[in-house]
Amino acid sequence: MRELAASTISDHVAEMCEEANIYLGQDVFGALKDALETEESPTGKEVLKQLIENVEIARDEQIPICQDTGFAVFFVEWGQDVHLTGGTLEEAINAGVRRGYDEGYLRKSIVKDPLFERKNTGDNTPAVIYTDIVAGDKVKIHFAPKGGGSENMSAVKMLKPSDGEEGFVDFVVNQVKTAGPNPCPPIVVGVGIGGTFDKVAVLAKKALFRPVGQSHPDSRFAELEKKIKEKINDLGVGPQGFGGRNFALAVHIEDYPSHIASMAAAVNLNCHACRHLEREI
Amino acid sequence: MEPKKIQAPLSDEDVMDLKAGDNVLINGVIYTARDAAHKKLVELMDKGEDLPIDLKGQFIFYVGPTPAKPGQAIGSAGPTTSGRMDAYTPRMLEKGMKACIGKGLRSQAVKDALVKHKGVYLAAVGGAGALLSKKIKKSEVVAYPELGAEAIHRLEVEDFPATVINDAYGNDLYEEGAKQYAR
Ligand code: SF4
């Protein structure tokens, strides 16, 4: 049994919070540059240039890419041969978030209760944490700070199996169309299909952690990702919704087996500030 | 097309010169307000009391920046979703506000009020918080310090880039732009 101190987890998490908010991953940065190449609208090009410059300023000045430094979302793959000492995983992650958001001058965007007083917790905790127990003695932490603007334009729908591929594609495209300029396009579209009501939403979230440009391993889904992306870009909404050919940078689908009576689907949107990081400990 | 330089505050004539799709560079003093500050301002209007700032001709920027690092005028400062301010915007226009800056769709009521009171809605590039922070030279709280990042701030801006979405003629770049590039 490998022993791992909770404080080690906290240290990594604190660093990841700062790093993810300041440095945009090469995958998304590359996709923005590709979009600039293909964009036809002059205003759309201007937006993409500003976004590329923005990423460079954030990196050079060590300041957040976007002021919405998000809800801290974690997917943890925990090797079952690892024993955590000195605290619980939840405490360790939240301690890391608290420190990272404070020391990194990141915005604290979490309120304690969603309905009544909506008082800010002051340290961006608690995080949203999903854990999978896996084989081995390693711990893999995936982190994404999730902005509110794009999260608010997301949806779950319990489709009927008879809705088929067409119904599924229509649901995704219509949801993105309704979102329009709100989620700060160009966007990354996370899509879940299958599973239960709750599972499908998590799949859509997980889809946003996949490196932009990497397609689904099953060629049927990979084809569908391409097809949906084309349909979305054909809406003409473009960068920031000002009109243009680059509304979406990527569409990522994650699937799971389904109940015979169901075909759950979910869309989780992310903006161009599609920040995600992973570390293995 | 080269962006137009404009100076805050705006007169009616300035507003009528702006058309949906225009790229502008804003100079001068603008104010910030998000949901909580709007709510407080409209409550004062309901009671017929004076507002802490005179809205006449002013720009309101919907923003909640990150904390400034030592030596910075302001932290990352991109626009927030404007739709959350829809309920309050017609009242702000009645009181003389001429321009608001945010991102995303506005309600029909807001678009109508822009025409009626001669105002414009502009979008700054959502998520370009680092870049926009460089265009803000000074920031100070002028009202509701208890709201923290949501307090009303007075900002001095230089060549702050934005695009006109809804003009005082009823045009909407979000609709027209998408139509032009749809296939
Ligand atoms: S949607 Fe993304 S880019 Fe836009 S404000 Fe929110 S976090 Fe920033």
Image (cartoon, coloured by chain):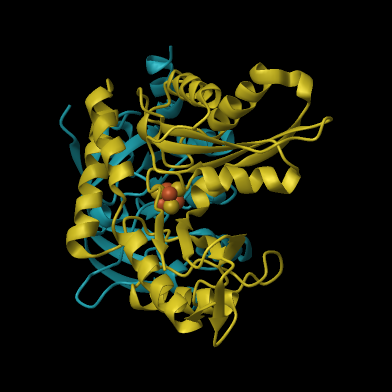
Chain colours: A yellow, B cyan
Q: In this view, does A8 lie above or below A145?
A: below
Q: Residue A167 is drawn in which quadrant?
A: top right
Image quadrant occupied by the C terminus of chain B: top left
Q: Is A106 or A92 nearer to us in this picture?
A: A92
User: Residue A165: image x %, image y %?
Assistant: 65, 19
Q: Quick check: can you spot residue A212?
A: yes
User: Residue B54: image x %, image y %?
Assistant: 40, 62
Q: Is A122 or B123 nearer to us in this picture?
A: A122
| Number of numbered markers | 0
Q: Which residue lies furthest to the top in this view?
A: B183
The structure residue drawn at horizontal position 53% and vertical position 51%, both measured from the top left corner, is B85
Q: Quick check: can you spot residue B143?
A: no
Q: In this view, does A29 lie to the left or right of B3?
A: right
The structure residue drawn at horizontal position 59% and vertical position 29%, both measured from the top left corner, is A172
Q: Is B2 or A106 nearer to us in this picture?
A: A106
The structure residue drawn at horizontal position 59% and vertical position 31%, both measured from the top left corner, is A175
The structure residue drawn at horizontal position 40% and vertical position 48%, both measured from the top left corner, is A274
User: Residue A79: image x %, image y %?
Assistant: 55, 65
